[in-house]
Image: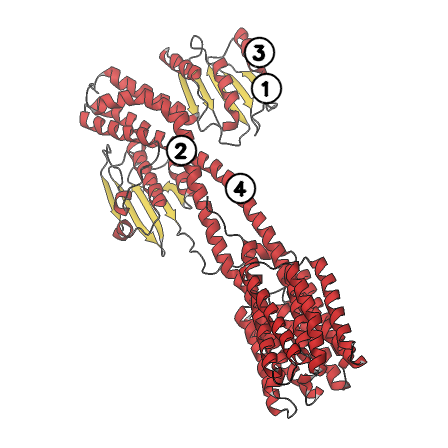
Amino acid sequence: MTELAGWAPGIERAIQRVIAGMGAFYALVMALWISTEATTAGRGTWMLMVAGLAILLVVTVRAWRTRIGTADIVAMNLALLVMLRVNAEVGTDGIGIQAGPAYVFMTTSLLLAALTLPWTIFWRWAALTTAVYVLGRYVGGTIDDLWSGLDEAISDTSTIAAAGLVLTRYRRAGRRADEATAARLEAGRREALADAVEQAAAEERRILHDQIIAALVSIEHAGSAGETDRASEAASRAREGLADGRADIGSTPESRWLVDTTGLRVPVTIDIDPELMTSGVVRPAVTVALVGAINEALRNVERHSGSQSVSVDVRRAGDAGVRVIVQDDGRGLPPDHVAGFGIRQSIEARMHEVGGAAEVRNGPDGGAVVELVWPADRPAGTTVPAAHVLSAIGDPRRFTYAVTGVALGGQLWLVARHLHGVHEAAVAVSTTALVLAVAWLAPRRPIGRGVTVAVVALAAALLAWGLAAAGDGALLDFRSWTVELTCVLIFTLVFFISFRALMALAVTLAVVMVVWCAQDPAVAVADATDPILQPIFYAAAIGATVWGLRALGVTTAQEERRSVQQMSLEAAHVAQTIVDRERFHHLRATLDPFFEAVQHQSVDVSEPEVIDRARALAIQVRDEMYLPGLLDDDLRLLLATARESGTSITIRATASPEGGAAVRRLLKAAIDPMTVRTATLSLPDSGAPYVRLVILPAADEPTRDRLGEALDPIGAEIESLEHATVITVPITPAGAPRPAPS
């Protein structure tokens, strides 16, 4: 069976790429710091920064090649202590990246912990890392440095925690999805085997009905008419069916559409759309089902209709469907017509198994009409959403609220600490309201293009308003809280809009900041790199990971489909082996010598004993067809002996497999060749609760007593009528007896 790649490994690879991308970004920042401070910093400070860059590069490479662990996070925290000394040496000023190498290592440590450690352990590392950073800023500094460090730590921790919550929840959901996939495949394997056994048995019954019995009846009729060649052809076809034990599937589209008219005396007009015969647009299994149903319809016309002619019309229906009309000019269906085995199994069930339908009705101008319709297979979609993972995450509303709340909490701390004036308060309230509204709306209804554009426009307007309210130089200090607040929308919308739309939001926010820098005399674009790149970095890292899972979804779904197809093939092979072993071995031994003699014309088919032999074998095959898997050697001998002594035994419908033991016991007890002249066994469709046997003439009292004693263990009810005895045996789904109906 195909080995599935799985969601969990794919999600791990996606998270590793995020870590590697983050490491590469901050390694570039460190390299710029080293080049900037190369001329002013001392040799020792410069070497410490180079060592920090080396640690970043090592962690980045390890994240790209394999999952990093606790040792990497410890190394980053030790490097953070060293970078705090570097900060003290070079005398940094500003926030974010402008705060120096220590900020880079604090942020990187938090990201590594959020993306690699369990959620409960992450908070311990986060508390340790932020405490080291805040206290390090304060040592040798002022109380303002301590508050600045605390503001940076809280703001970054909340944002990083939101990113970590998204990806770690995806990691957990990926494991659950893989477990669910494995369970689905195992259940599918068992179901495929059960279905394959059932379909193989049904196909075997069709072969018995459509090929073997049809051939025996044809030999009987041909013998009566002295048509030796016709009998020989029928025997040859029957031997092929016995040899294969399955329906023939031609090697080319043309060969699959060959309708069998051998042995039919009524003229047949066949008109098949040439495109269907040459293009192979219909799957081979569907073609075999259609042709098999057509052949059975033609045999019914030959046997029952009294027609002078019959037509077969095969046309395309829609883009890739097929519609077949088989119409004769015979007597049509009687008002009380009940479909027999041939219609139910060889036509209706055969079409249903391939996703089609069949209808048998009277034609408008007389005669009977058989209509076969096969709808085209539904084309596979080009995009398969990560439905298994999304469903494994749980309630999308609760998850969205959690991510939004974590990301929003730290930013509201900045708002509370650095809010000045009514205008800034209005911006804070409006932006928070927008975030909460989107968090409430997104899980409840699809976010279309119009809503997405409106959200992006509102976010850009609120960001511009916030920067204007904060005044010149806002992007260089904590008055840039508007940027962090609007970036929360990225985490809120990451599950509900496309990656392209998410990047459009991030780029729009970045463009607003670049435009603001152009008219702000206190800020150059190069100095505001951190806030400008922040939304793009979050959207690219988190959005690409989440929406990249759609491509993983396509791959996983394709692999799962291939695995299911492989299981179906294996199950079909096992099922066919089971059917061949259980049924066809006995039939070949019984029938093949007779068919071989007729095929090679070593017997005279017009002789009465040959005709009687064909008739008797047809009855025997019907027993096998109507009692699938229920006949043993003793019961076969009993039925044959009773018929040879003149007892008429009729079996109606198809036995429910659950009633096998009860049916065997009923027949062995009730069929007495010495006293029973007629026996009719009624076996309702699978799932019906009762089996009935009617025997003529009515049993005498000693016989009823004997039957009652023999059939009491299976809960049989024996009813004596004037001319018949009716025996009813209740059948439960498990095959155990239950009280008979009153």
Q: Amino acid at mark 1?
A: Gly
Select label 4 or label 2 by which is in front: 4
Against 467, residue 625 (above or below) is: above
Question: Dot 3 lies on which element?
Answer: helix
Nearest to N terminus: mark 4 or mark 2: 4
Q: CA distance from mark 3 to mark 1?
A: 10 Å
Q: CA distance from mark 2 to mark 3?
A: 40 Å
Select label 4 or label 3 by which is in front: 4
User: Between residues 10 and 732, which one lies in front from this camera angle?
Assistant: 10
Query: Residue tagged by mark 4?
Result: 186
- Is the residue under label 3 in contact with that under label 2 (CB below 8 Å)? no
Looking at the image, residue 675 sits to the left or right of residue 74; the answer is: left
Q: Residues within 10 Å of mark 1 (few under 14, many from 20)?
A: some
Query: Residue tagged by mark 1?
Result: 715
Query: Residue tagged by mark 3?
Result: 709
Give me the residue at 56% from left, 56% from top.
Answer: 387
